[in-house]
Amino acid sequence: MIKKIFIGTAWPYVNGDLHVGHLAGYLIPADIFSRFCRLKGYETLMVSGTDCHGTPITIEADKRKISPQDLVAEYTPKVLELIQTYQITYDLFTSTTTDNHKKITQEFFLNLLNKGYISRQKSYQYFSLTENKFLPDRYVEGECKHCQAKEQRGDQCENCGRSLEPGELINPKSKLTGSSVILKETEHYFLDYSKLQKQIENFVFNSNHWRKWVYNESVGYLKEGLRARAITRDIDWGIEIPKNKISTNFLIDNIEHKRFYVWFEAVIGYFSASVEWAKKNNKDWEDFWLDSSCRHYYFMGKDNLIFHTIFWPGQLIGQEKGYNLPYFPAVNNFLLLEGKKFSKSRGIHIDSLEIAKKYGVENVRFYIASILPENKDADFKWQEFKETINNELVDKIGNFIHRVLIFFQQKLNQKIENENLTQEVLVKTEETLKLYQENLEKCEMVKTFNLILDYVNFANQYLDKNEPWKLLNENKNKCEEIIFSCFQIINNLRILLWPFIPQAMEKLSQFFNLKIETKTGQDNFVFGLLRNIKLTQKPEPLFKKLN
RNA sequence: CGCGGGGUGGUGGAGUAGGACCACGCGGGUCUCAUAAGCCCGAGACGCAGGUGCAAAUCCUGCCCCCGCAACCA
């Protein structure tokens, strides 16, 4: 049976350049996993896109006195270039501004409405008299009424973690102009999560294969009890409410000037992008969303955790169509830079494109993979970056490959007659292949990374212990066996390392006139021997040291 | 008592009761196929204090410290 895998990654806001935190948070781990699934021959669909509708977009646009459209148009190409540069294997990278996404978001809403999960509530929202408009929560800041923390946003206090209702902020002010704001009545649609509490609990309690802290965090949130959550906002940038399809007695006031709240809308992108992909490729999205054997993996930073373990599952459950729920939220912690949080204005910042241009995509991918913040915050250190590349990638991995290839070419004249595999190598290889797959199935990238290094250490030790350069004249038969066995290790490394450093492994493949196969239904982790080895070119080092 | 995570040699990690392991770094040695690469040997650690156990890095209690859930941010 062919396994089906859906991979959703966080949708980056297009309000600024992406820094290496984005790489470590979701782009690289998702891509490693995606490539692993394709090597396994799983039917894999990975989608994402730019999140264009958030309030962060309008804030940034206002700040720069340009339209949200212009802001989106400016940053989108940069995001696309980044994905291209790092070779992130999306099947579709789209945007929340498509007609398709708009239509599906509206359908999701109407479904929830018809199933009785939507309510209307009047409430007081912050309104700026000077700007003559309602201000989104994020435009407003003041003191939290629970813990008195200052400069909290209007929707949630990040100091004590509590959600804040409008009016619960003390001394509210416009974040943009600094002027005071008043409360004014407004009406919104709400998604009543209290009606979904039981089903969401059922879903979460059955998911204890999640990372422990992810599970605990979600359970902790559920314990407080779910409440109805507003899904519309008073804003003009975003997806319109389909008022023509709502019975007139259920319309809310001033509906033309409301848009869907971005938290509600952006996650629907996982679904709408799947539909868009299916249309473009003449496939069925149902294969991924209705076939219960398809497992859904999501990659995101920890600030997105609750949205993927509680809110988005709730939206899906509320469709009552049996859509697949998240199977594994691969939530990452944050990446620090030399022990400090990223902050562009304070110069604590590494642009993802710049570092790729300066040091090479493969080097960046390799180092980031070695420090992914899977279980706690990780630290990007320049010194460590260079040491990891020079000592591990170049000296251990690159040098091993190179010494074998050179020996083969110069001492054996590219001829091996004894194609016999040493038992020791067979055992180590099979064990490595097994653990590799077990770890990656659980999205344990760092463990997998260390496993590969362990395999390479074994390889270097094996070579030194057997000294084929001495056997060359004494026992050519044995000498060939050693080199032949080392070639099998290299051939496996080619596959095992491909998800981490794809371009380098594709280059290595060319030496042997091979390709990395990712055919659906074909498992590339079955250990097969590489025979009749011929090099297509003179061996040259795959990796170079950094100064 | 808001919620959650974490303290293991110089650094980063693994290890949830029974030999404290891995990589880098450091000191010494050695090979020579290789990219001043490789290999071998060595020094060096379980935050603190109690408790339960034949046995605790691991379980329990108390304490100390760090971090996230805010901030142009995933």
Image (spheres, coloured by chain):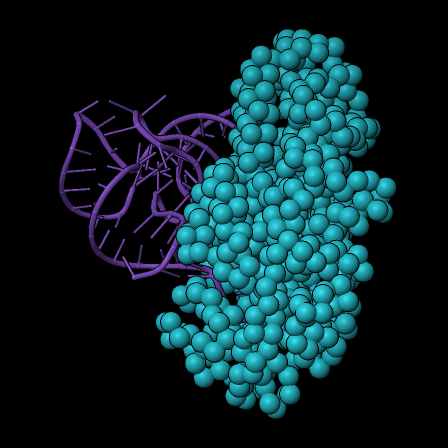
Chain colours: A cyan, B purple
Residue A132, position in %: x, y? 64, 87
Residue A369, position in %: x, y? 58, 44
Q: Is residue A213 above or below residue A106?
A: above
Q: Residue at x 76, y 42 (%)?
A: A285
Q: Is residue A245 above or below residue A329?
A: below
Front residue of B68/A508: it is B68
Q: Quadrant of residue A7?
A: top right
Q: Residue at x 67, y 44 (%)?
A: A321
Residue A82, position in %: x, y? 72, 56
Residue A427, position in %: x, y? 56, 16
Left or right, A81 with respect to A465, comes to right
Front residue of A460/A191: it is A191
Left or right, A373 with respect to A106, comes to left
Q: Is residue A329 above or below residue A159?
A: above
Residue A308 visible in the current orientation? no
Q: Residue at x 47, y 41 (%)?
A: A205
Residue A343 visible in the current orientation? yes
Residue most extreme to the bottom:
A130
Q: Residue at x 71, y 44 (%)?
A: A46
Left or right, A528 with respect to A394, comes to right
Q: Is residue A480 above or below residue A37?
A: above
- In the picture, which quadrant includes the N terminus of chain A? top right
